[in-house]
Amino acid sequence: MEQKPAHVRILDAAHELMLTVGLARATTKEIAKVAGCSEAALYKYFPSKEELFIQVLHERLPRLTPLLRSLAAEPGRRTLLENLTEIARQAALFYEQSFPIAGSLYAETQLKRRHDEAMRQMGSGPHVPIEELDAYLRAEQALGRIAAGADTFAAASLLLGACAQRAFAYDAADSRPDAAEFADRLARTLLAGIGQAPAPGIDQAPAPGSGQAPAPGIDQAPAPGSDQAPAPGSE
């Protein structure tokens, strides 16, 4: 069987060790050993452990940042509900898988400081997805698909914060809320607060069995006996 390229073996080894022993204890020496190469060879492909960590996040975990950047570059694609649901699903899985990797840093104060400084120098860090989502929401706001007065930074913080909390709060529980269902409910709730009324291109009904009225901006028929005209396309 043909051996994988060295940089792929290094990424595989780093991912495995970061998941099992945590980022703080996954040394480049041990990663190189598991990958079957020298430590010098590892540094040929990855200048630092922090750079290796970033590549593990990008290539071995759900691709949250590329999704956010692609949506911000082309706002108006699909419905807001579809986009927010997919963002929430990817974010929930990303934090679920990255939490065990990065969690060990909080037990090593000095190491965490060095790690944080390296992240800043590379323009990376846990705040970046919030900024990327804020950029996407502002792009949709400019198209009129999000209410003009909506606080897009707060909305981005709420969505990603909830996804991160799902990973943390249920870490010791027997199970976590299903990522797809969690994402759907979270996206609908967020959209109820920031969506236009009506929000262009959104015609989804409330989540099945939720017992809730559609969020503002989601097309619906008027209440029986009301004088309100039906929403376009609801008949």
Image (tube, rainbow, N blue to C red):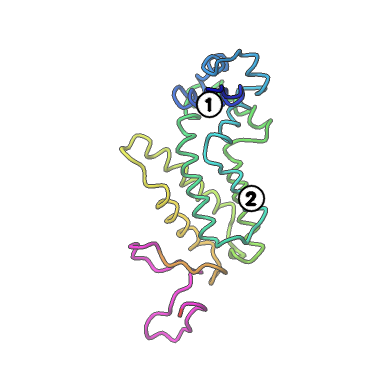
The residue where tag 1 is placed is: 12
**The label number, if any, that marks residue 70 in the structure image:** 2
Q: Main secondary structure of the magenta part?
A: loop
| Residue shown at 61% from the left, 12% from the top | 38
Above or below for 156 versus 122: below
Height in image: 28 above or below 225?
Answer: above
Q: Horizontal and vertical percent for residue 227?
A: 44, 87
Which residue is at the front of the view, 166 or 84?
84
Residue most extreme to the left: 174
Q: Which mark is residue 192?
A: none
User: Is 25 a magenta residue?
Assistant: no
Magenta-span inclusion, residue 224: yes
Density class for disc 1 (Cα within 10 Å; few <14, some 14-19, many ≥20) is some
User: Which picture quadrant has residue 224?
Assistant: bottom left
- Say whether residue 114 is visible: no
Residue 188 on image: x %, y %: 46, 60
**Magenta segment boundaries in residue numbering:** 207-234
Mark 1–mark 2 Cα distance, whole angstroms, equals 26 Å
Q: Position of residue 212 (x, y in %)?
A: 37, 66
At x 41% / y 51%, what residue is drawn?
Answer: 182
Is 28 left or right of 163, judged from the image as shown?
Answer: right
- Tell me which residue sits at (47%, 34%) in the image: 99
Instruction: Pick the quarter of the image with the C terminus.
Output: bottom left
The answer to whether residue 108 of the structure is visible from this angle is yes
- Identify residue type, mark 1: Asp
Q: Quadrant of residue 36?
A: top right
Q: Amino acid at mark 2?
A: Ser
